[in-house]
Image: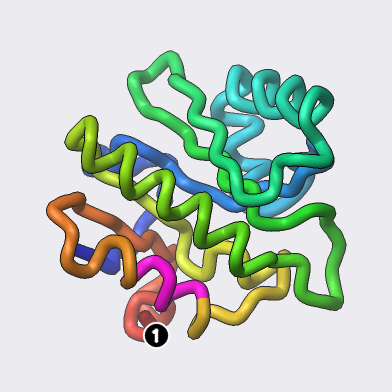
Amino acid sequence: MIYNIVGDLLKQDKVDIICHQTNCKGVMGAGIAFQIKRAYPEVFKKYKEFCDEYENILLGRTLFVNCNDGKVVANLFGQDSYGRGFCQTDYVALEKAIATVAKTAAKYKKSVGFPYKIGCDLAGGDWSIVSKIIEKYFMDSEVDCYICSLTQEQEHEC
């Protein structure tokens, strides 16, 4: 089941697995990735090491990192590089990563959370495409999936 809620994804008690799209270059310099880097330094450390080791074969993969507060951060490798002004999101790679999250969450009976417009703001993706991918894996699932937006207006756009 998918729930659209207003609030900071990193502060949601209902969310066990925090999902965000990452690049394959080991950079968490903006957006939710930067927030995760500050809140969970252990995530950035493992992410950076993973990128340094596997940079050329990361698209579509998911790196799960257990955090000190009991949360898990899922780094979804849905874009090769970073930058603005054009679409960085690789929809096939992002879907593969989301499918991995759905399977893992179901196996361990964990809830998941995505930032509203994951892969769409800074990475330039199309929310109508990405939201359909999320719906494909979570709409009829027993896994609780939360799409977290920061404003009421964003909640009504979902």
Is-magenta flag for residue 134?
A: yes
* 10 Å crowding of disc 1: few (<14), some (14-19), many (20+): few
In which quarter of the view is residue 155 placed?
Answer: bottom left
Count of numbered badges drawn on the protein? 1
Residue matched to label 1: 157
Q: Which residues are magenta?
A: 130-135
The percent position of residue 2, horizontal first and vertical second, equals 23, 65
**69 on left or right of 142:** right
The percent position of residue 134, horizontal first and vertical second, equals 38, 66
In which quarter of the view is residue 46 placed?
Answer: top right
Q: Which residue type carries mark 1? A: Glu
Of 39 and 76, the residue lying toward us: 76
Is-magenta flag for residue 29?
A: no
Prevailing secondary structure of the magenta residues: helix
Q: Is 117 drawn above or below residue 22 in the view shown?
A: below
Measuring 36% from the left and 80% from the top, which residue is drawn there?
158
